Image: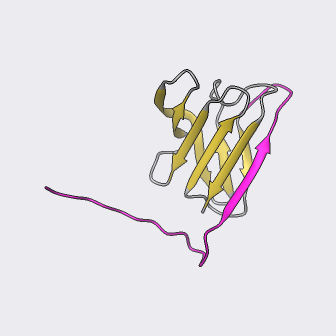
Amino acid sequence: MAITSTQVKNSASVVQVAVGRYLDTGTVAAFNITTGFKPLYVKVMNNTSGDDLEWAHGMAAAAGHKRVAAGTASELTTLGITQLSYGFTVGLDLDINVTSEQLTWIAIG
């Protein structure tokens, strides 16, 4: 049996965590969140619908693992989360990023 394992540590000597909320009552679009660090993990939860989207280091830009409250899961290759050197971008996935629906996010670096 062959095992391949990789690990990435952040460049800081401590774990960096940022948590916040986002609400757009206008026309929704992709948006950037500034955390002040390059996250290795991001989760965005739609508090209204119960849907969520996760991205982890090693996943492609605009990707994510999406779970909807109805119980289905899917892998996004577009409109997901993109890691930035100072935070992340949340794409315009219409289950997650919806007008007047409260989002909660967490980023870990």
Q: Is residue 91 above or below residue 10?
A: above
Span shown in magenta: 1-29
The quarter of the picture where residue 15 lies is: bottom right
Which x, y percent locates residue 50?
A: 65, 29
**Which quarter of the figure is the N terminus placed in?**
bottom left
Q: Would residue 14 be counted in the magenta stretch? A: yes
- Residue drawn at x 69%, y 46% as measured from the top left: 105
Colour mapping: secondary structure
Counting every numbered tag in the picture gives 0
Which x, y percent locates residue 108?
A: 61, 59
Of 3 and 93, nearer the camera is: 3
The quarter of the picture where residue 80 lies is: top right
- Residue drawn at x 26%, y 59% as measured from the top left: 4
Which x, y percent locates residue 40?
A: 55, 58
Q: Is residue 35 above or below residue 50?
A: below
34 vs 43, left or right, is right
Q: Is residue 4 above or below residue 46?
A: below
Secondary structure predominantly adopted by residues drawn in magenta: loop
- Residue drawn at x 60%, y 63% as measured from the top left: 109
Residue found at the very far left of the displayed protein: 1
33 vs 68, left or right, is right
Which x, y percent locates residue 78?
A: 53, 33
Residue found at the very far bottom of the displayed protein: 13
Of 30 and 52, nearer the camera is: 52
Residue found at the very far right of the displayed protein: 25
Q: Would residue 60 be counted in the magenta stretch? A: no
